[in-house]
């Protein structure tokens, strides 16, 4: 597997885990929430900038993006 792809996958998995912890969700719930409200797409599209930020900032950005797209978790 290409190193860039592996890094992107690892980063996405880490963000899902941190998101689930911050919002007290099971990993599967966090994944489906992020998928439904655009968080996964955001991570994919904005990886180049987001992976340079702290994980806390990335989770905050995910929360904002999902809220803008109809998510109710604040």
Image (cartoon, rainbow, N blue to C red):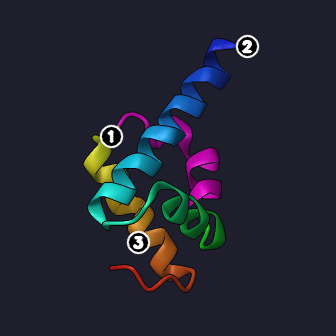
Q: Residue at x 50, y 73 (%)?
A: 66
Mark 1: few/some/many CA within 10 Å (<14, 14-19, 20+) = few
Which quadrant holds residue 39? bottom right
Along the viewing direction, whichever of 4 and 36 lies nearer the viewer: 36
Q: Are marks 2 and 1 in contact (CB under 8 Å)?
A: no
Magenta part of the chain:
39-52
Q: Where residue 37 appears, x then y in whole percent?
A: 59, 73
Tag nearer the camera, 2 or 1: 2
Q: Is residue 32 above or below residue 19?
A: below
Q: Is residue 41 left or right of residue 7?
A: right
The C terminus sits in image quarter: bottom left
Q: Where residue 55 appears, x then y in whole percent?
A: 31, 43
Q: Where residue 15 appears, x then y in whole percent?
A: 43, 46
Q: Is residue 49 left or right of residue 24?
A: right
Q: Secondary structure at mark 3?
A: helix
Q: Residue at x 71, y 13 (%)?
A: 2
Q: Is residue 72 above or below residue 27?
A: below
Q: Where residue 56 appears, x then y in whole percent?
A: 26, 50
Which residue is under mark 2?
1
Which residue is under mark 1?
53
Q: Earlier in the sequence, mark 3 or mark 2?
A: 2
Q: Earlier in the sequence, mark 2 or mark 1?
A: 2
Which residue is under mark 3?
64
The N terminus sits in image quarter: top right
Mark 3: few/some/many CA within 10 Å (<14, 14-19, 20+) = some
Mark 2 → mark 1, Cα distance in angstroms: 25 Å
């Amino acid at each position: 597997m290409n190193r860039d792809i592996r890094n992107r996958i690892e980063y996405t998995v880490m963000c899902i885990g941190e998101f689930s912890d911050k919002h007290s969700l099971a990993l599967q719930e966090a994944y489906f929430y992020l998928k439904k409200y655009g968080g996964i797409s955001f991570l994919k599209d904005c990886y180049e900038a987001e992976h340079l930020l702290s994980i806390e900032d990335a989770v905050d950005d995910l929360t904002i993006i999902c809220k803008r797209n109809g998510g109710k978790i604040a």
